[in-house]
Every structure is written in structure tokens, then in C-alpha cells.
Amino acid sequence: MSYLEFLSQYGDRILSGTLVTIVLTILSALLAMAIALAAGLMRMSRNFFVRAGATVYIEIFRGTSLLVQLYWIFFVLPLFGITLEKFTAGFVAVGMNLGAYGAELVRGAILSVPKGQWEAAQAINMTPTKRMLRIILPQALLIMLPSWGNLLIELLKGTALVALIAVADLMFQVKQINGTTFMSAESFGTALVIYYILARFMITPFMRWLERFMQRKLGRA
Amino acid sequence: MLDWRWDFTLDILPRLLVATGNTLLAAGLGYAIAIVLGLVLALAQRTPSRAFTMIVREMVEFIRSTPLVLQIFFVFYVAPQFGIRLSPWTAGMIAIGLHYAAYLSEVYRGGLDSVPKGQWEAATSLNLSTARTYFRVIIPQAMPPSLAGMGNYLVGILKDTPMLSVIGVAELMHTANAIGSETYRFLEPYTMVGVIFLALSLPTAAAIRLFEAWLRRKLGMI
């Protein structure tokens, strides 16, 4: 079977797998951002217990493998009475894992906003919440955007693991195709190229655009 | 509901610890390959030929932005198509070594770029060959600034070894899966795998942070 025949026969499945991967990436990215923001802010809280909670979360999720977390959430969590559907378990695991990495980015970025900005906001009598939302976070966002670009690529790569709990993403589809056709170079090779295109020609340019957009917004262009 | 069984945990612990040995071996071997190959990839981007540099650069980007688990499958299943039969260990080490070589090459690149230009000029004026300049002058100076980044990827490679279980390397995750399917108990094996990984990676990360601080002082970079 030539490569063109291979594509015409299995293109549909590869395409549907790619769509699942994209949806998974977007959902887990949103979850990771929400967790990163929450855990990053909690890490800077004055309350010891809030800070400790965030630290434990971050260390556990950064200290173990994504695959271990995925299996744990999918196979062990049901024993606690929490049964997640495999797709949900997949994006929750990826989101929680990358959220822990993102939390450190958020904390680092907030700390690197110049001190004068904090003082100025206080001087004009802003409430702490308003200061964080209107002054600090927008500037922190610009600082951490380049790192988030790398993190999103890690996240995209992380979603490939959900194939191991049988979520029908790109990785899963090509594994199945390989199992029936034994055309390993064609099936796995195609998937490699698709992941590469997603990372290099979709995520990277989007993050660059977002960075420029934020720079204009903050009058730094 | 939840019933954690300590007797069962103790029963499976020896098997898990043996597998931990394999995990450490896999991480160590993979890292050794990555350290050497990463340097090759970094040096290959410094040849006079711009076309060659671009090809290597794109290769590194390709490896860095595609999933490791897919690369492991690719190496393991595609090599036999070309008549090369690889054992799971060999295929796994090639894949994980290459993946981290791409990451480490970026670290080295930063280190190599940070060596002042005067060092090159001095080496040229002493009539040292390019190879000699690299190995005796440039690389020794590029290493210290690279060490912090290298340490992070040591922890990274350790945490990525569970992916080798997909092609049957008998490391920690693979053993936990086997125990789970023999006994239908997943709680203890998977939880213990998580605990063992924490026990390995937290001290390693802490040691690397200490080493990094020591290095900064040593190099006068405070």
C-alpha cells in the first residue's frame, strides 16, 4: 500500500484523532491556567495553611510523572467514589499536572513586577484585589507569556498519554492503525508530523501574536 | 469504598523496589546518552554552513515539540521495518536519550554562547586548532553555566521513564501495571509508584538547588 492509499484509507481516523487532541489540549490548557493562577496566588498568601496547601499540591504534581497521575486518577480515584469518564480523567490529569508547573511561572512573574508598581497602586488607595487585577496581573501576564508558550507545547505533548487510557486521540488512532496495518513508519510518522505542525505552526505563532497583542495593550510596543 | 491493605503493600514492595532499580538505570543510561548526543547537536549548530545549522535546528525543534511516548513507539516499531530488531530497552534508551539530547542541546547552546569572544581570539592567536579550542578552552567554560539546566532535565528524564512501560521495559510503572492486572488491586501499586517517585525526585531537586547555589558562589555569580 502506498502512502497516498494509506492516507485516503485512514485519513478520516487520523483527522478525528487530531480533533480530539486539539479539544483535549484546549480544555486542559484552560484548566491548567485556572489552577496555575489559583495555586500561584495561594503560594504567596500570608496564611500559612493556604500557602502549605498550594506547596503540597505543586510538589506532588511536579514530583511525580504525568503518567502515574493519569493512571491514579483513572484507576484509583474510583475507589474513593469519584469515577471520571476517560476523556474527563485525561484532560483533568494533564491540566492538573501542567497547572502545577504553571503555578511557579505565575508566582515568578508576579514577584518580578517592579516594586514601584505595588507602591504606586497603594498610594492611589487601590484595594488589594483591584491592585492585583488591574495593575499587577496584566504586567505579570506579559512577563510570563513566553514561558507559557513552552508550557503549552509540553501540554500538547502530555495529551498523547491519554491514549493509554483509551481516549481516542491522535496517538490512540495511529496506534490502532499500526496494529491492523503494521505500517509503523507511515502511521507513527504521520502523527509525529501532525504534532509538530500543531506545536510549531499553531501554538507558537498564536503565543507570539498574543505577546504582541498584550504589549500593545500595555503600551509597550 | 477505600480499603488500603498494608500486608499487600508490604508483599509488593520488594518487586516495586527492584523495578525502581530499573527506573534509575533507565534514567541514568538515557541521561548519559543525552549528555553526549546533546553536545553533538549543540556543536552541529555552530558549523560555518548555515544550511546545515538550520537543518539541525529544525531537527531539534521537531524532537522537542513531539510527544516522547510517540517517539518511543516510532523507534520501537519502525526500526524492524528496516530490518533492525531492537529490544525494548535499546529502543527505549535511543528514544529517551534522543529526546533529552534535544533539550540538553538547547542548554549547551546557551552555555557555549556565553563564552566571551576574546577566548576564541586568544585561542586563535595561540594557533590552536578548532577542535582543540573547543575541547580545551570553550567547552570547559561553557559547562558551569549549563549545569543548572542540566540538573532540571535530570529530574525530567527520571519522571519520563514511566513512558517506557508502553513498549514493555520492566520499570516501575510497568511492574505496577503487572501487579494490578494479576491481583485486581490498583490502589496500592499505583499509590506506591507515586510515593517512590516523590521520594526520588524531591531530594534530587533539592540537591540540585543546593548544588546550583554552591556553583553560583563558586563562580562568583551571586
Image: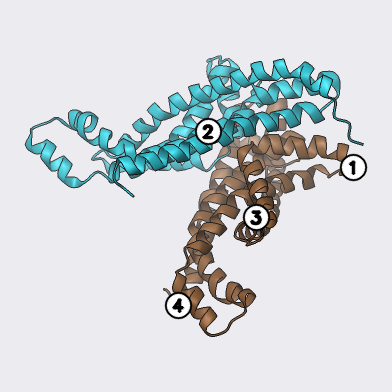
Q: Which residue is found at the position 63% from the left and 62% from the top?
A: A46
Q: Chain of mark 1?
A: A
State the image coordinates of residue B17 (x, y, percent, origin top left): 66, 19
Q: Nearer the viewer, mark 3 or mark 2?
A: 3
Q: Amino acid at mark 2?
A: Thr
Q: Which mark is residue A81?
A: 1
**Can you say whether B194 is above or below A134 in the image?**
above
Q: Which residue is found at the position 51% from the left and 74% from the top?
A: A118
Q: Is residue B195 left or right of residue B131?
A: right
Q: Amino acid at mark 4?
A: Gly
Q: How is the image coloured?
A: by chain
Q: Which residue is found at the position 55% from the left and 16% from the top?
A: B86
From mark 4 to mark 2, how far is it between C-alphas? Answer: 43 Å
Return the residue at label 3: A51
Neighbor class of circle 1 (other Cα within 10 Å; few <14, some 14-19, many 20+) is: few
Q: Is residue B144 visible?
A: yes
Of residue A218 and residue A48, the one placed in the foreground of this image is: A48
